[in-house]
Image: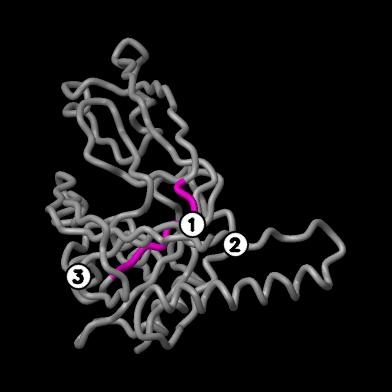
Amino acid sequence: MSLLVFQLQAPLSAWGDTAVGEYRPSHDYPGISALVGLLGAALGLRREDDAAHARLRDAYGYAVGVQSSGKLLRDYHTAQVPSQASLKKRPHASRRDELAFPRHDLNTILSIRDYRQDAGFLIAIQASEGSPYPLEMLADALRTPRFVLYLGRKACPPGAPLHPQIIEADSADQAFDTYLERLIEAITRLNGVARSKSLELPPPIERIAWGQGIAVGLAPDLTVTRKDRPLRRKGWQFGDRSEHVALIRKEA
């Protein structure tokens, strides 16, 4: 069985969770909405193309190998925006247009946004029959994306190449093991010829989270409900899905 595996490493990342009011929390690892959005950007899909994103959502199974969920960073955020009444009077297509309003028409809003610092993950993707894009095509898109990729928010670009690989394995956990072995070998070779500071070796996986459509050879330690199944871009509508989580026991 073929699986596409790649890494997500960044100094800052943000994985949207249920938001209430002006508080924008972050989950400690990416959900299906983030992964579908990442693949869509790499392929060059427009955000408003709900049908294309639905095919990415339904035609593939996703698993996340958590190497490190990082540390929480909480940002107290302020921004100036015109009132809704003012926006109705003038066309606006960009943030620059919004700030071009007279100063007395601008209001200051407050929000709190959470980020994850120095988090790292491996992602495995399994295609179902009739999937719109072969795994090789997805891998090529991640190597040379059409749109800029970021890990949850535009302020969170990847800190390392995604390094997508097609791996033959019986399950996602086996594919993760093979991917890490290959990555460690590649980094070790680079460190052997590098004259500058050596690259750090990737950490092991602490837990694996997955939904339907992908084979994982581990029994889940818990099953949770996440509201991260993208439905419609307009109105930011998401549905519920079941997600399994298995903890990786470290050998004594």
The magenta stretch is 62-69
Residue 80 locus on image (x, y percent): 36, 21
Neighbourhood count class around disc 2 (C-alpha, 10 Å): few under 14, some 14–19, many 20 upward: some
- Colour approach in the figure: one colour
Residue 37: image quadrant is bottom left
Of mark 3 and mark 2, the one earlier in the sequence is 2
Instruction: Using the image, determine if residue 242 lies above or below residue 52.
Output: above
Proximity of marks 2 and 1: CB atoms separated by less than 8 Å: yes
Proximity of marks 3 and 1: CB atoms separated by less than 8 Å: no
Which residue: 23% across, 83% down? 128
Residue identified by numbered label 1: 67
Label for residue 212? Answer: 3
Foreground residue among 119 and 248? 248
Q: What element carries label 1?
A: strand
Q: Kindly identify the amino acid type of the residue bearing the numbered disc 2.
A: Pro
Residue identified by numbered label 2: 202
Q: Distance between the residues labelled 3 and 1?
A: 21 Å
Residue 45: image quadrant is bottom left
